[in-house]
Amino acid sequence: MASSNNSSPLNISIVGAGIGGLTAAIALRRNGHNVQIFEAAEIKTEIGAGVAAQTNSLKVLDRLGVSRENLKGVPWQGSVVFPSDGSEEGITSSWLIPGMKENGLLCHRSDLYEELKRLATGEGEGPPAKLCLGTMVVSSDPEEGTVTLDGGEIVHGDCILGADGIHSVVRSHILGKTLNARNSGWSCFRVIFEVSDLLNMPELEWLHAGIIGSRIVIDRDGPFRMFLIYPFRNGTLLNVVAFYPDSPGDEAGWTPTATREEFIAKFPKFHSKFLHFLDLPIHGSIHRWRLRVLPHLPTWVRGRAALLGDAAHGTLPLLGQGAGMAIEDGGSLGCLLPAGTRREDIPARLAAYQRLRTERDEFVNTESVAQLSKGFNLVKAKEIQSYLFEYDAMKAAEECYRDQFGASGVSRL
């Protein structure tokens, strides 16, 4: 793309300093834009633990200069699936796309977060993004490009990107109403274990023997229950996500953490051999998460404001693509708002972003929920694997830009 050299850099306000917001910040600073990121938390932490940086995510991350070494990831070569009653041996499932020996990296969410923060705010091409922690955005004006902070300050800018998650404030101003994510009827436990003693425990050989990647223990005879277990942080830690049906309306007695006994009680049909990992040292606490799903939105864009990541399409984690779609969204915005973009260009560029991203992001939203009724068939669904993993988001965004806007801007990505 070529540049119009007389255009000033844009001033862009990103609300939310999660994975999607930081990815967008990296892409936009490299195009020379001035980026401010407003994050309500005073200390931003990522307690979600494990995250899959799948092949489609890595295509974006590599373009943005992410160091794979800093991600400390474990190659995801496939999965071994076990019936929960222990009646059969595990079935190994490699990825079904020809030539695809592994599907990205299994990482600690905080390692990915810290690497993205380094690239967004540290030394590098373009002005470093300014990260404003402990700064809550309470309202926004999508038409004017302003956000109002909890202290009353109004921040003027050319563009607002709402990366503020499933409870997004920016979304309510784009839609003109509050639209909340609905309870899915499902919850999960998330817990990390240290694996220093794993090889000395024969009863846990099923967790590491054979292909490098995930271990899945699934109950298909009743309401969907599943363990998804995989190593990360160079294989020193083990991530466990345990899905179970829940009663969304029953708030009495619900707590964000759980005991070992409460964990076991939710999986009464699981053979005892699949519960021995609870004997490993726990790295932190057992967290309990209510899983919520955002309905498809009538729009993600209004005037100078757009949504990305969970703020636009939050869903269940059953495809492992929540972070992936946020990363794709952020990289795509960088391609559609290159150097040379003028303030008056922004509404059309954001409208193009929505047209480009809606079908793919809404597919992941819908299909993630459908995995509950399909008994988690991703491991044997070649068409879905191909659609998810072979996609190149930034290439698609560059082609979209050329088709719709010609060659009037420079992308430095």
Image (spheres, grey):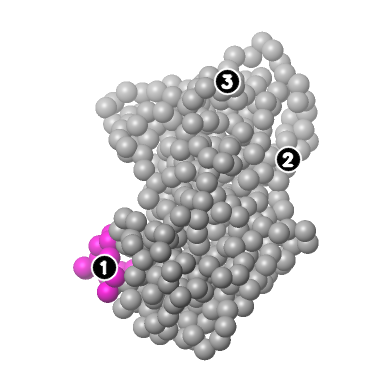
Q: Label 2's element?
A: helix
Q: Which residue is identified by label 3?
A: 126
Residue 78: x, y in percent?
63, 65
Q: What residue type is labelled 2?
A: Lys
Q: Which residue is identified by label 1?
A: 259
Q: Main secondary structure of the magenta part?
A: loop
**How far apart, in angstroms, are the residues tagged by discs 3 and 1?**
47 Å
User: Does residue 259 lie above or below 391 as drawn?
Assistant: below
Q: Label 3's element?
A: loop
User: Does residue 214 lie above or below 347 as drawn?
Assistant: below
* Residue 260 counted in the magenta span: yes
Upstream in the sequence, badge 3 or badge 1?
3
Q: How crowded is mark 1: few (under 14 residues within 10 Å), some or many (20 or more)?
A: few
Q: Which residue is identified by label 2?
A: 395
The N terminus sits in image quarter: top right
Question: Which portion, as a residue range, is magenta?
Answer: 248-261
Observer-nearest of 91 and 155: 91
